[in-house]
Amino acid sequence: MISKKNLIDRFTGYVRIDTQSDSGSNETPSTKKQWDLARKLATELKEIGLEDVEIDDNAYIMASLPSNIAHEVPVIGFISHFDTSPDFTGTNVNPQIIEAYDGKDIVLNAEQDIILSPDYFEDLLQYKGQTIITTDGTTLLGADDKAGIAEIVSAMEYLVNNPHIPHGKIRVGFTPDEEIGRGAHKFDVEKFGADWAYTMDGSQVGELEFENFNAAGAVVTVKGKIVHPGYAKDKMVNSMYIAQDFINSLPRLETPEHTEDRQGFFHLTDINGDVEETVLKYIIRDHDKDHFEARKEVMKNMAVDINTQFGREVIKVEIKDQYFNMAEKIEPVMHIIDIAEEAMKAVNVTPIIKPIRGGTDGAQLSYKGLPCPNIFAGGHNFHGRYEYVPVESMQKAIAVIVKIAELTAEKYSAGYEKN
Ligand SMILES: [Zn+2]
């Protein structure tokens, strides 16, 4: 396998380059600094021997590892994003390497008393004895998703250097701006040309995800009537009270803080109001398509009821779909999950299959015609100073990628023909 030292060097080299994205920008990539890593990655992919290495005007990178077998098999892809979250700074990341982790508190920053403790983050204890890469307490780490990038690059390098392992054509894709929900927007699925792909962007070792939320955003605008308070009797309409009724009419327990697993919710994210006008912003989430549609109907019907009471339009609900549950696109091609599961078991990783309470780039890609479940990249506590990644988990991810490539070549040996 790839040596631990090489993997650590590769990964820490990536995280030292600041690639924070910015939702306030309309450009792609949203920040110029993402080019710094993008260009380096394109060069590296060429150096390790991949072909068709391309970086487009939006910093999307694609490359191919050519097939090394005589017969045709499906083309598979591996995808990660090189930007980091706008939630926390990614400037001057200074990774710390903890060897043979002893299961005790890790002092990230003695000066500022920032401790990564298993008392709070119990997951740490499963990595006792392993090599853990942490932050110095002042930035995020960027294992989300530079761990995924390091794993894909290392797996491709391994396959190049071990030509006795049979595999079909493999495509590699690295994207900017995933953290601001735009990683898949300008991803050219046709050019990528894979039959299916995997994002290496999950968290703990073993994660395999192909169900995510259906998602919509709602903007509720309530119109009131401002009149001098001294002359307001029977004339003033206070939009804030109507908004309050609207809020209270939605089920109080169907909110993020009261739900888990496959339970959906309405989440009030923002209130802005005065007497004349109040605007509420919601996000609506549900794994189940019918429940998702029903949630949207509930909101619209509440508006109709309130408007009927007033005899005019005082409230307006505008709902926009954001993304959909990829399960709908994966279920017809469940063999791509089976292969990933089998690959994990073959390298002694126990698959953890659970629905994502969020979205992934893979969901958007799946709806663009590239079925794309998500596999663990190994990191924990994304988007903050407590982010860490065990090197052994990254090694497992590399082994899973290699095994998926091998199994795909094996399974399609008997006269597979592309239709
Ligand atoms: Zn990510």
Image (tube, rainbow, N blue to C red):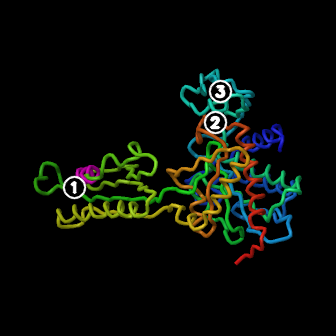
Give how far across and how far down residue 266 sits, in percent: 37, 52
- Which element type, helix, strand or loop, lies under badge 2? loop
| Front residue of 399 and 85 | 399
Query: Circle 1 sits on which residue?
Result: 226
Q: Which residue is most to the front?
A: 414
Mark 2 or mark 1: which is in front? 2
| Front residue of 385 and 57 | 385
- Identify the residue at horizontal 71%, vertical 44% (top origin): 348
Tag 1: Cα neighbours inside 10 Å, few (<14), some, or many (≥20)? some
- Which segment is the magenta one? 238-248
Query: Circle 2 sits on which residue?
Result: 139
Q: Quadrant of the C terminus?
A: bottom right
Q: Is residue 154 left or right of residue 161?
A: left
Is 23 above or below relative to 143?
below
- Identify the residue at horizontal 60%, vertical 63% (top origin): 334
Q: Please name the amino acid that badge 2 sits on.
A: Thr
Mark 2 or mark 3: which is in front? 3
Q: Is residue 304 left or right of residue 196?
A: left
Q: Please name the amino acid that badge 1 sits on.
A: Ile
- Of the two numbered discs 2 and 1 on the same chain, state the one appearing first in sequence: 2
